[in-house]
Image: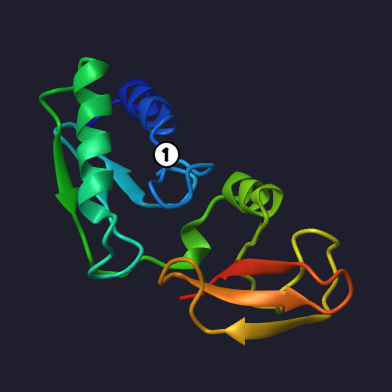
Amino acid sequence: MVSAQATHEVLEVLRHVPDPEIPVLSVVDLGIVREVRDDAVVITPTYTGCPATLAIEKSIREALDASGHSDMRIETAISPPWTTDWISDEGRAKLRAYGIAPPSKHGARCPQCDSAGVEEVSRFGSTPCKALYRCRDCGEPFDLFKCH
């Protein structure tokens, strides 16, 4: 069992590893880092086949090595699958500030003006995990992080 101090230390290191597709978020903010054990960091990709998975693993490996944790392995767990529920509150706030609507079970809101008067333009946004929306009130287009 890994100590609370060691877990905290590794998580602090990983809080500085950005997601390659949404660099304002860390892999911890996004909920990709699932568990820290004495010998491994367990990650779950946002979806099976995510093209950023290898880049994320490489960035995590580099951060662990640079911080003196080269003995830790990186394991990938796909069950249960990642869910947008794992995005931290801080991560949701960072998404909104970056201009991406965070996922919500209560409907999309414009990240610019906070209006609920939005419409889907395309189910496919700038990456497979986002959809393209437009605000009917301020007219701004924005990505919505898809719920799943």
Q: Residue furthest right?
A: 137
Using residue 49 as the reference point, say whether residue 82 is left or right of it: right
Quarter of the image for residue 141 reads: bottom right
| Secondary structure state at the residue bearing disc 1 | loop
Above/below status of 63 relative to 141:
above
- Which quadrant is home to the N terminus? top left
Residue 87 in the image, given as x and y percentages of width and height = 51, 55
Quarter of the image for residue 5 reads: top left
Residue 37 in view (yes/no)? no
**Of the pair 21 and 109, the residue shown nearer to us:** 21
> The residue under label 1 is which amino acid type?
Pro
Residue 132 in the image, given as x and y percentages of width and height = 59, 75
Instruction: Count every numbered label the image shows and give the total.
Output: 1
User: To which residue does mark 1 refer?
Assistant: 18
Above/below status of 30 relative to 80:
above
Q: Identify the residue at horizontal 28%, vertical 45% (top origin).
A: 56
Using residue 9 as the reference point, say whether residue 119 is left or right of it: right
**Of the pair 64 and 85, the residue shown nearer to us:** 64
Dot 1, crowdedness within 10 Å: few (<14), some or many (≥20)? some
Residue 127 in the image, given as x and y percentages of width and height = 43, 66
Q: Identify the residue at horizontal 38%, vertical 46% (top origin).
A: 20
**Of the pair 139 and 129, the residue shown nearer to us:** 139
Q: Identify the residue at horizontal 63%, vertical 46% (top origin).
A: 94
Using residue 133 as the reference point, say whether residue 12 is left or right of it: left
